[in-house]
Amino acid sequence: MACLITSGRKIPCKSAVGGIKNIFFADFGTLGDATIVAGEITAFAGTPDWFQFDIKNSATTLETAITSSRENGTTFYDTTVSMTLTFQDKATQEQLKLLAVARPHVCVEDYNGNYFVVGLLNGGDVNGGTIATGGAMGDLTGYTLTVNAQEVNPPFFVTPAVITADVSAVQIDPTA
């Protein structure tokens, strides 16, 4: 099989910023088939409810490692979403318990307006996290969560309306 390179890449303008704005979770299997056009998801056949978690700190990241083996002839993408939620409350803790035993689809919105779906085919697995109350006044009191997904493709870009049209109105207010 010929694996031909089809394009080079110029150096872009310095207009991008880092950071995660929101993370959305949907129950595994609710997306249905994805319509993918030029590397971007433009529709889902299913009817997922996306539950929005607002993220406002630099400790939340999305990272994908490419794992390729010449010996085995395999390539896959190992994506990790690490998130920090400030403030502890009972309702959030109960939701995190549900996420820990589930296999959700994850969507990450960055500060550049990009949306990425993690765990499109296989879902994501929570494989770590903490419930933390720091020792000093400025330390974290809240939660950390790590979700991992292994897929045959990196997280796909998604047309924003595909996600935002199905965002659930149900959202925890931890200070209420």
Image: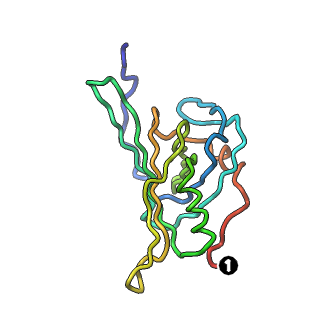
Q: Residue at x 56, y 61 (%)?
A: 97
Residue 123: quarter of image: top right
Is residue 17 shown to the viewer in this render? no
Say if 108 sits above or below 123 in the image. Answer: below
Question: How many labels were placed on the picture?
Answer: 1
Say if 87 sits above or below 149 in the image. Answer: below
Quadrant showing the N terminus: top left
For residue 88, side relative to residue 13 (left or right): right
From this viewpoint, which residue is outermost toward the left? 71
Quadrant showing the C terminus: bottom right
Q: Which residue is mark 1?
A: 176
Say if 27 sits above or below 138 in the image. Answer: above
Percent coordinates x, y for residue 78 in the rendering: 40, 42
For residue 106, side relative to residue 68 (left or right): right
Percent coordinates x, y for residue 170 in the rendering: 71, 62
Q: What residue type is disc 1 on?
A: Ala
Say if 9 sits above or below 90 in the image. Answer: above
Q: Determine the secondary structure under disc 1.
A: loop
**Is 125 in front, or is 110?**
125
Q: Residue at x 61, y 44 (%)?
A: 28
Residue 31: quarter of image: top right
**Is 127 in front, or is 120?**
127
From this viewpoint, which residue is outermost toward the bottom? 137
Percent coordinates x, y for residue 161 in the rendering: 67, 46
Percent coordinates x, y for residue 120 in the rendering: 55, 39
